[in-house]
Amino acid sequence: MTSSLACRNRSLHAMTINRLGKAKAKLGLLRQVLANNVRQLRKDLGVSQEELAHKAKLHRTYVGMIERCERNLSVDNIEKIAKALEVEPHQLLMDGRR
């Protein structure tokens, strides 16, 4: 009896994680747009993540985490990155595919 209960609990846990993952994916769309824009603009300028971090006065690993969608950015950091990339902050949040 306990093994079926444990199996049911694992199944419920998996369903919860799956639902949370879907919700997280929906909530992270703007973060993905920002990450893609930062990466593309950085490459267009021909600068490394380390160089961008130096220009923006941020830690080099933080830039990598931004590009991998692992961090939420404050408005202040969006502004710093935009200035370092020589664009307006709102441009980092615009989805170019639309």
Image: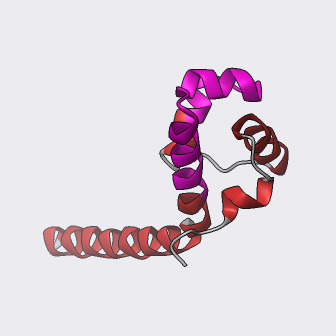
16 vs 55, nearest the viewer: 55
Q: What stretch is highlighted in magenta?
A: 34-63
Rendered location of residue 42, percent (x, y): 57, 38
Whole-percent x, y for residue 5 in the image: 23, 74
Quarter of image, res 16: bottom left
Q: Is residue 98 left or right of residue 9?
A: right
Of 91 and 44, the residue lying toward us: 44
Where on the picture, by quarter, is residue 8? bottom left
- The residue depicted at 33 percent of the width and 76 percent of the height is 15
Q: Can I make out residue 65 in this image? A: no
* Residue 57: percent from left, percent from top: 77, 24
Q: Is residue 74 above or below residue 3?
A: above
> Viewed as shown, does residue 64 lie left or right of 21?
right
Above/below status of 47 relative to 36: above
The residue under the point 71% across, 48% down is 73
Quadrant showing the N terminus:
bottom left
Residue furthest front as drawn: 45
Q: Which colour scheme is used?
A: secondary structure
In the picture, measured across the screen, residue 2 lies left or right of residue 26, that is: left
Task: From the top left corner, tell me how far across and down residue 19 is, in percent.
Answer: 42, 76
| Residue 44 falls inside the magenta stretch | yes
Residue 16 magenta-highlighted:
no
Residue shown at 80% from the left, 53% from the top: 88
Residue at image point 50% right, 73% down: 97
